């Protein structure tokens, strides 16, 4: 089978941790170029300027954008205008409106646009969704507590406007919640903790309709917690390990205790979208984040430095 050429743009932590291994193992894709101001991948032709890359490599039909959300729109728009299919890291943009604009542009040009949510590809998300489909949710709680220094070492952009702070990981939990709940919920209250020297929250407590709550915290050292617990009219479901392990009434029921299946699944989905020129853009997780930042009560907490 011929593999489709793809360029990775923004060679940093997630490109090297997940995109490169997923592409190297994929039957669908050939990593044909990188574009990054300083990052490279050994053995892969590299460009530092995106416009030059687009002009010089018309043979590469797909670009996968791995930089932080704020600069991503300009890259995505330029790629679509140059006739390239586009895959977006999560969160898909800095604002909802800019992602709507990208989707309209992609549709007008018949190009694939994929707003990825890697946590939706975790091993136990599809089984959890199927299990919940004929049940009534009585109560749900998300605990998403991790160490920002481990996952975003020295990345000041997460605390700058548009970086979303603790919602950068929290949106992964919301991407699962919005995928598996049989009925949608909406945010009713938020309490956001901002370090005194930063522009985005380091912790958030959220309340939604339907008796759903969430606790996001970026200050957890030691073991990391990515759990969603849902009480239904019949039994209790727990998704652990960021959606990779499913428990029903405390007993393991499905999944695999590894995050390494998520990016291969994203690239398999992108291959299908590329073949048909279709868009997959679901902004439901980002709507909850925008609502929390709109409605949230602001608490000032200790200064934070990496
Ligand atoms: P990162 O390492 O800080 O950034 C990735 C690369 O983007 C940088 O190495 C940089 O490459 C480029 N970049 C940064 N600022 C830029 C700018 N203003 N203009 C153009 N390029 C810029 O961040 P990351 O952790 O990989 O995260 C990137 C995206 O992946 C985020 O949306 C994040 O939510 C998502 N993600 C991250 C993780 C994680 O564990 N860190 C997990 C899943 C998803 P050059 O300097 O070489 O241009």
Image: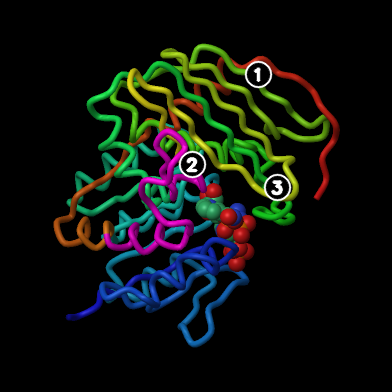
Instruction: Give the distance between the C-alpha atoms of the residues marked 3 and 1, in whole angstroms.
Output: 20 Å
Magenta region, residue range: 240-268
On screen, residue 203 versus residue 89, left or right, reads: right
**Residue at 72% across, 42% down:** 220
Is residue 263 on the magenta stretch? yes
Kindly identify which residue carries mark 2.
172
**Residue at 80% across, 50% down:** 306
Kindly identify which residue carries mark 3.
147
Q: Secondary structure at mark 3?
A: loop
Q: Position of residue 177 (x, y in %)?
A: 41, 32
Kindly identify which residue carries mark 1.
191
* Residue 91 visible in the snapshot: yes
Q: Position of residue 73 (x, y in %)?
A: 45, 47
**Residue at 29% across, 61% down:** 84
Q: Secondary structure at mark 1?
A: strand
- The one nearer the camera, 272 or 77, is 272
Residue extending farthest to the bottom is: 43
Q: Are marks 3 and 1 in contact (CB under 8 Å)?
A: no
Instruction: Give the distance between the C-alpha atoms of the residues marked 2 and 1, in whole angstroms.
Output: 19 Å
Q: Are marks 2 and 3 in contact (CB under 8 Å)?
A: no
Instruction: Give the distance between the C-alpha atoms of the residues marked 2 and 3, in whole angstroms.
Output: 15 Å
Crowd tier of the residue under label 1, counting other residues whose Cα lies within 10 Å: few below 14, some 14–19, many 20 or above: some
Q: Is 291 situated above or below 47? A: above
Crowd tier of the residue under label 3, counting other residues whose Cα lies within 10 Å: few below 14, some 14–19, many 20 or above: some
- The one nearer the camera, 179 or 305, is 179
On screen, residue 30 versus residue 37, left or right, reads: left
Q: Is 56 situated above or below 218? A: below
Q: Secondary structure at mark 2?
A: helix
């Amino acid at each position: 089978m011929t593999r489709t050429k793809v360029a990775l743009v923004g060679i940093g932590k997630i490109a090297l941790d997940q995109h490169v291994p997923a592409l190297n193992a994929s039957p669908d894709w050939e990593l044909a170029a990188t574009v990054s101001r300083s990052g490279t991948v050994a053995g892969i032709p590299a460009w530092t300027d995106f416009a030059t890359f687009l002009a010089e490599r018309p043979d590469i039909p797909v670009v996968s954008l791995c930089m932080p959300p704020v600069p991503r729109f300009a890259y995505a728009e330029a790629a679509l205008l140059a006739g390239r299919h586009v895959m977006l890291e999560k969160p898909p943009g800095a604002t909802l409106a800019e992602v709507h604009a990208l989707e309209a542009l992609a549709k007008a040009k018949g190009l694939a646009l994929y707003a990825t949510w890697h946590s939706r590809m975790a091993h136990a998300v599809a089984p959890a969704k199927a299990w919940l489909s004929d049940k009534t949710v009585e109560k749900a709680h998300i605990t998403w507590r991790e160490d920002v220094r481990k996952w975003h070492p020295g990345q000041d952009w997460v605390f700058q406007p548009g970086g979303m702070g603790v919602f950068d990981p929290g949106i992964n939990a919301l991407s699962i919640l919005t995928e598996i709940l049989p009925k949608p919920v909406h945010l009713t209250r938020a309490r956001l903790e901002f370090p005194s020297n930063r522009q985005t929250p380091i912790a958030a407590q959220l309340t939604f309709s339907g008796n759903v709550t969430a606790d996001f915290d970026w200050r957890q050292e030691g073991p990391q917690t990515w759990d969603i617990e849902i009480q239904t009219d019949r039994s209790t479901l727990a998704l652990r390990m960021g959606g990779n392990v499913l428990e029903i009434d405390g007993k393991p029921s499905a999944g695999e205790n590894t995050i390494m299946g998520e990016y291969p699944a994203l690239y398999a989905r992108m291959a299908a979208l590329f073949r048909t020129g279709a868009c997959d853009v679901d902004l439901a997780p980002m709507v909850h984040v925008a609502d929390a930042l709109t409605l949230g009560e602001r608490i000032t907490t200790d200064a934070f430095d990496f």
